[in-house]
Amino acid sequence: MAPETTQGARPLPTLIGLFLALGVPAMSEEPAPRPGQVELRTGDLRLVLADNQAYGEAHRAGYNGVSELNHQGGEPSLFVPAYAGLNFEHIFSGDAASYDRDKFEPRLAPMQLVRVGDTTYDLRQDRTEGWPLHTTMTFEAASPDAIDLTVRCVPLDDAWAKHGYIGLFFASYIESPEDMAIHFIGRSRPGRGDPTPRWIRHVPPAHGESASHRPAGSDWDPALDPGFPLTLVSGHSPYEYVYPFYYGVSRGKAAVFMFERPEGGEIRLAQSPSGGGEGNPAWDFVFFKRGYRVGEVFHLRMRLVYRDFRGAEDVVRAYEEWSGQSVERPQPGR
């Protein structure tokens, strides 16, 4: 049978060809044991992975990724039960021609959970209705208290040419934390305040305001057409981060989001005080891929650590151990 095609797009590669391009094994794979969800337990963690289907009494359709995360003692999930964390939320180009479509296309297009290891599952999406992007998100439960996520994407056609970047947005909806803020080592943007690196505790004043923190040293803000609808992308904060990690605290536990610095791209830290409803902030991130090529894989890698909060120094050490990078601690009192 001929490969499936879409009007105006190139023929889709075969699944085996895509798996090879993405570095994903095409053998010894199994579908998830239950449609829409799979539970993993490793080390101290219990987590549930979900595709875009609803399940149970609370979890809604359209929220994928890690739908439940707690320790095996059984305390409430870090994430809002109806929603998820590390949820693949948006694909964008900054081009107004795409604004009339549903901005939540990754939530709507079918996904498939596939077991590729004892504690590893892929969440695969061939493409969305408007975006010709094949995406494989590999989730691995890393003992005792971490989840590794590798996102591999292949543009099947060029729908992003106008501004020259592919934008991906991932959201984590946090259930009623005692502290709405995220914390990161950063500094003020040039001309916006103190350039000295320090610990920054930040809660945006409102959804879409001072929402997105770029990396220190970047002189690039993505081009966006007038009326761009994703204010968590366009709402630039006065701060920039020095190291690619941040943490928040909920119920005495630290959720630490840490990232590899991607080649040919940028990670932006993003947040909303009300993304998951009143009292439920969103602790998010945005990936901008520049210099992409149709048919070639690009990727990002990150880790989410979830454990008892033992102070900022423990967070820094967790990042250093994972990344192999040394962090210069801010001066006391900063």
Image (tube, helix red, strand yellow):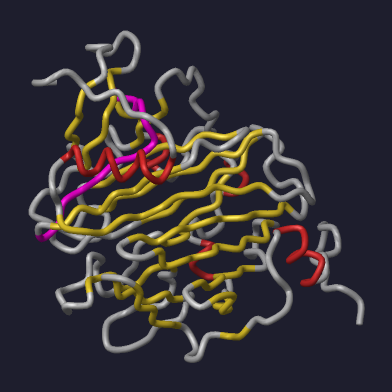
Q: Is residue 247 magenta?
A: yes
| Count of labels in the image | 0
In the displayed structure, does residue 58 sit left or right of residue 39? left
Q: Is residue 128 left or right of residue 120?
A: right
Magenta region includes residue 261:
no
In front of the other: 333 or 241: 333
Say which residue appears at 55% left-offset and 52% top-offset. Answer: 91
The quarter of the displayed image where residue 245 is located: top left
- Residue at image location 67% in from the left, 42% down from the top: 160
Going 73% across and 66% down the picture, which residue do you hit? Answer: 19
**Hey, which quadrant is residue 332 in on the image?**
top left
Quarter of the C terminus within the rendering:
top left
User: x, y percentage for residue 135?
Assistant: 62, 60
Q: Quadrant of the N terminus?
A: bottom right
- SS majority, magenta: strand
| Relative height, residue 280 to residue 246 (above, below) | below
Identify the residue at image location x=26%, y=59%.
306
The image position of residue 150, as x and y in percent, is 53, 56
Q: Position of residue 44 (x, y in %)?
A: 26, 70
Q: Front-most of 229 and 59?
A: 59
Q: Which residues are magenta?
A: 238-251
Reply above or below: 238 against 265. above
Most foreground residue, 228 or 62 = 62
Q: Is residue 136 above or below residue 100?
A: below
Question: In this image, 169 relative to 307: left or right?
Answer: right
Q: Please say if 191 is above or below 144.
A: above
Q: Residue furthest top?
A: 191
